[in-house]
Image: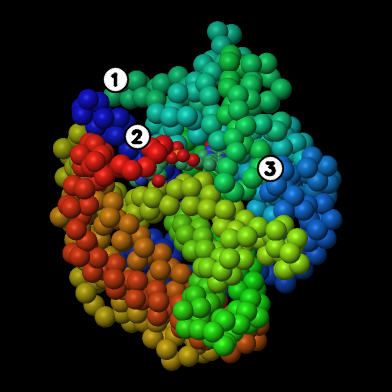
Amino acid sequence: MQITDNKDKQKALDLAEESRETEWKYESFVAELFKGSFRWDLVHPFPEQSPEDKAIGDQVLVQLEQDLKAHIDPEQVDRDQAVPKAALQALADKGYFGMKIAKEYGGMGLSVVNYTRAMALVGSWCGSTAVWLSAHQSIGVPQPLKLFGTKAQKEKYLPRLAKGAISAFALTEPDVGSDPARMSTTATLSEDGEHYILNGEKLYITNGPEAELLVVMALTEPKMVHGKPKQQVSAFVLETNSPGFEILNRCQFMGIRGIANGRLKFTNVKIPKENIIGQPGQGLKIAFVTLNAGRLTIPAISAAAGKWCMEVSKQWSNKRVQWGAPIGEHQSVQIKLATMVAETFAMDSVSALTTTFADHESADIRLEAAMAKYFGSERASAIADETLQIRGGRGFETATSLKNRGEEPYAVERLVRDLRINRIIEGTSEIMQLFIAREAMDVHMKFILPLIDRHTSIGNKVMMALRAGLFYVTWYPRLWLPSFTCLQTQHLSCANRCHLRFIARASKKLARRLFHTMAIYQVKLEKEQLLLANFVDIGTDLFAMAASLSQAEHLLASGKASPELQDVVDLFCRQARQRIKTHFRKPCQTPTKLLGKVSTQLLKGKLDWMISGIIKP
Ligand SMILES: Cc1cc2nc3c(=O)[nH]c(=O)nc-3n(C[C@H](O)[C@H](O)[C@H](O)COP(=O)(O)OP(=O)(O)OC[C@H]3O[C@@H](n4cnc5c(N)ncnc54)[C@H](O)[C@@H]3O)c2cc1C
């Protein structure tokens, strides 16, 4: 059993490895941070949206707000567990299902920044509606077609998709969530070579039950590698009116209750061979690259949620008087308020920076987008939870109930429920940590993988060892030298300039620790998830600090922010530094072995005696 498990694990790791983008076409700020190089020049001056593009976005946002208020009642959506068909049609008629699709195909042709601004606005009004739009265009058929589709596929599908033919992204299966290596849906080429025949099941497909088009990932003919058959996953566009397509169930959830999501079944569904996206075997790569860009919506929605919470918390903390003072004057509430402000600015900075990078197409954003998703989804959930706490009983009460009693109908409990999913979809937080860690270590893995690969010839191994030696002999000593980075800032306070110097130092320490840890654990490092998560959390906080400081400098210089921003950024950086210091210490202080022991005892049933006095689930 153990042998099979290890084999499965290795298969999953191999497939994930093969499906990653191996090339770094552009520089990445975060990848550099992990190498010990704080490249302030990559994030400063803060990349600004052009005035022309901003004007386009501003216009869309004004209209979108009116349309949302006219057609969507978020409380009713939550209660009825559906966005009314007429409302979806009204949004489609206005072109909101084609915001990201190029104008030549009938879409709005919005930039990534304007698209995410629009999604943030939708998210601040109704989480379910945001998911309808996002599942369709952040990850649904338009996105992989834009990245990998042929001209013919684009001409055939994009105009339909822009008009509101709803689409979905179908990767997950009942037994396949975070680990696509165990995918069982198959697409077999027909005897005449004209069709693929699709069989299998997909689970949790957002928009799936209402979609006209799906992008489906399925196993195709294995290819022979070193004399052994190797699994291949391919991606297809599927018309859901094809015979053999069935909706088995519609799933219901604690939040975003108005989405359409379900379990789909394919029985001998014919897909024309020209509907394959990219090349056979590229399916997982297509899925991962689609998710890399698609992930930018969640950070924008998270920052918007933070702003919404700031407004609700401000109003309530001023108005509500308890124990002789507005609750906002009690220190415990002040801490929540201030942290909310600081983290919201950080989320906004990270999101704005990453989306602008995506538009400029001059940076590799795989790490930045994953960190933005991880950071945004975690922080926004925590902020919404604290807002609920600040609202006390009213935080737990539904907006409809509050309205019935004549109070402000702030839907904080709905926000908490709606945001929770963001830590699970498009890569769980744990998977984001592993993904970020792998990409962060790429500079080292490039040397290590060929050295441990039994298919690499001795000659190549020697060559690689020499190249590694040359690299490390110059790179490693530099990690011990002081930083002489020129940190040009005129508008940041002394405290904030000091935070910049901290990033430069901490980045070197991070690179050293990562390198030493790799040397100690070698191939076993992959199992040390606590260590990897610590490195990722340090890197994420350093990135958020740099993004916040750069955006602050820009906003202060251009007079777009009041001087109070200095304190907001200072607070975020101080709190981040505290966390970073703790993370650097954590590996020695965490009882890792004991944690493993106790969890194994639970899994083996040795602690079943504790699970008594309850009605068991
Ligand atoms: C509302 C909703 C909408 C969704 N929409 C879509 C969609 O449109 N298209 C689509 O294809 N899918 C969709 N999904 C599926 C979603 O992407 C998966 O739920 C998610 O990837 C996690 O997979 P899983 O639920 O199978 O959890 P699992 O993969 O079984 O994970 C369970 C837990 O184990 C942890 N875990 C797993 N592997 C590891 C590891 N190696 N190391 C450490 N921890 C690990 C996870 O982080 C998680 O905490 C949706 C899901 C929901 C609930």
- Residue 353 is at least partly visible in this image: no
Label 1: few (<14), some (14–19) or many (≥20) C-alpha neighbours in 10 Å = few
Sequence-wise, the earlier of marks 1 and 3 is 3
Q: Where residue 556 sits in the image (x, y, percent)? A: 59, 85
**Alpha-carbon span between mark 2 and mark 3:** 36 Å
Q: Determine whether, in the image, residue 308 is placed left or right of residue 489.
A: right
Question: From where the camera sits, is residue 509 visible?
Answer: yes
Residue tagged by mark 3? 81
Q: Residue furthest bottom?
A: 494
Can you tell which of label 2 and label 1 is closer to the viewer? Answer: 2
Residue 227: which disc?
A: 1
Residue at 59% over, 35% down = 251
Tell me whether the residue at label 1 lies in contact with that at label 3, contact meaning CB atoms closer than 8 angstroms: no
For label 3, the SS is loop
Q: Position of residue 356 (x, y in %)?
A: 59, 64
Q: Nearer the viewer, residue 301 or 269?
A: 301
Is 87 on the left or on the right of 132, as rendered? right
| Sequence-wise first label, 2 or 3 | 2
Q: Nearer the viewer, residue 14 or 606?
A: 606
